[in-house]
């Protein structure tokens, strides 16, 4: 059995969780059906899609560096959009293989407290640091230098238009982007590889018992997934909506959002919500909850669809996040997405565990 690192110590991590006793209303066989549905119906195919998107991004950047042009740069940026949306489907997974070797942070170093990570990326570009232009050396460096947020700045930040030219400084920047894309592809493949196979993490979650180093019961496996979904919903609510919108129009700070440079903030939050919807359906909660509680699955679906529809309506305007947050009406509509997120969070974080006889544990975001 592979050695696994249990999620701990991250600013958004769940801490102090205590496995709860399985309630008599739901048998272990049903719990395993929920867990299996979520793993096989969403997690594994979504990681496979992430690898495909990372490969396409890498190929597009390679082509840009070999023959710079505006068309090639546009293709790279389109590939980036596909990549971050694919990432958003698995962003909620912060345990197991994602924890090994800081893989989660290597893929997505956010939030960036005080802009220190951004400063590292800007410094590497400004100083034409040769050690960031090769994947192997880059992967040994700070996590802030090698993930999606680093690529976001490299492809969309100040000076990125030069990537369409053969300017000397742009040549280094493009080589850095190549290395980041290769690192993202490599890390994504490593995560999926560790989920797969007879001794992979999926098998570990689906074969709990006294010899299992992490999961002793079907309930503990399901708790891990529900805890991760709950945490993701709270991050979406607190960090991506409320903290960005502020308490009033004057308090809005669009730069607090991930991917604002590339214009992918709304698409990625929408993809986060769609992932929660997919997990809700893949887990077949509507069929496997106690009969008197099955309506909650429909309510969770409704709330998550409200998040998607509200943000899609803003996305369709074509305005930047900065513009949306500066308008009284659009600011209110962006902030308003927090309401259905709260509803979905209550069901997935509180109602589901209670109805299934589980305790998902203390969330480190509580009370912040």
Image: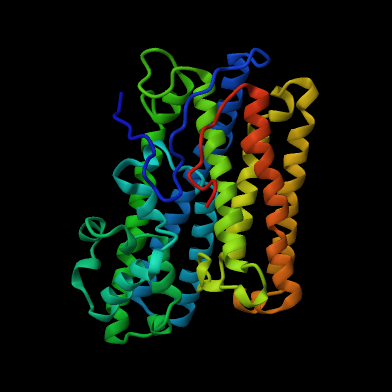
Residue 344 lies, with reference to residue 335, above or below; the image says above
Classify 24 as above or below 339.
above
Residue at 41% of width from left, 80% of height from top?
160
| Residue 321 in the image, given as x and y percentages of width and height | 61, 73
Where is 66 relative to 107, above or below?
below
Task: Examine the image and state in which quarter residue 359 appears.
Answer: top right
Q: Number of callouts in the render?
A: 0
Q: Position of residue 88 (x, y in %)?
A: 53, 53
- Left or right of residue 326: residue 85: left
Q: Is residue 316 among the parts visible in the rendering?
A: no
| Front residue of 344 and 78 | 344
Image coordinates of residue 173 in percent, x first then y, are 31, 76
Viewport quadrant of the N terminus: top left
Residue 308 vs residue 161, the one in the foreground: 308
Q: Is residue 17 above or below residue 198?
A: below
Question: Residue 348 sits in which quadrant?
Answer: top right
Q: Is residue 140 visible?
A: yes
Q: Please indicate whether residue 88 sits to the left or right of residue 51 in the image.
A: right
Residues 368 and 124: in front is: 368
> Can you tell which quarter of the image residue 326 is in?
bottom right
Q: Residue at x 39, y 42 (%)?
A: 98
Q: Residue at x 39, y 12 (%)?
A: 210
């Amino acid at each position: 059995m592979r050695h696994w690192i249990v999620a701990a110590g991250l600013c958004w991590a769940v801490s102090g969780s205590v496995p709860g006793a399985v309630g008599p209303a739901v048998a272990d066989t049903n719990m395993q059906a929920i867990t299996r549905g979520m793993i096989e119906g969403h997690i594994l195919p979504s990681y496979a899609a992430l690898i495909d998107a990372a490969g396409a991004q890498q190929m597009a950047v390679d082509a840009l560096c070999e023959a710079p042009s505006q068309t090639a740069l546009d293709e790279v940026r389109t590939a980036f959009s596909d990549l971050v949306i694919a990432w958003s489907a698995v962003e909620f997974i912060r345990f197991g293989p994602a924890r090994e070797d800081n893989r989660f942070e290597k893929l997505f170093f956010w939030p960036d407290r005080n802009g220190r990570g951004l400063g590292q990326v800007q410094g590497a570009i400004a100083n034409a640091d040769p050690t960031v232009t090769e994947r192997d050396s880059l992967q040994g460096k700070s996590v802030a230098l090698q993930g999606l947020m680093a690529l976001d700045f490299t492809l969309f930040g100040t000076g990125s238009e030069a990537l369409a030219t053969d300017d000397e400084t742009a040549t280094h920047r493009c080589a850095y982007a190549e290395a980041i894309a290769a690192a993202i592809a490599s890390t994504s493949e490593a995560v999926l590889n560790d989920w797969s196979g007879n001794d992979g993490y999926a098998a570990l979650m689906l074969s709990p018992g006294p010899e299992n180093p992490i999961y002793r019961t079907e309930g503990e496996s399901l708790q891990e997934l529900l805890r991760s979904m709950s945490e993701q919903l709270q991050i979406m609510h607190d960090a991506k909506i409320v903290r960005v919108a502020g308490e009033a129009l004057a308090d809005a700070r669009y730069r607090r959002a991930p991917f604002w440079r590339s214009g992918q903030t709304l698409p990625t939050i929408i993809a986060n919500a769609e992932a929660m919807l997919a997990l809700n359906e893949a887990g077949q909660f509507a069929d496997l909850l106690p009969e008197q509680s099955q309506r909650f699955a429909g309510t969770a679906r409704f709330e998550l669809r409200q998040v998607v529809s509200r943000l899609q309506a803003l996305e369709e305007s074509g305005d930047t996040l900065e513009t949306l947050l500066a308008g009284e009406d659009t600011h209110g509509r962006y902030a308003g997405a927090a309401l259905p997120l709260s509803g979905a969070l209550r069901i997935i974080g509180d109602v589901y565990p209670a109805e299934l006889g589980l305790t998902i544990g203390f969330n480190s975001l509580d009370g912040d």
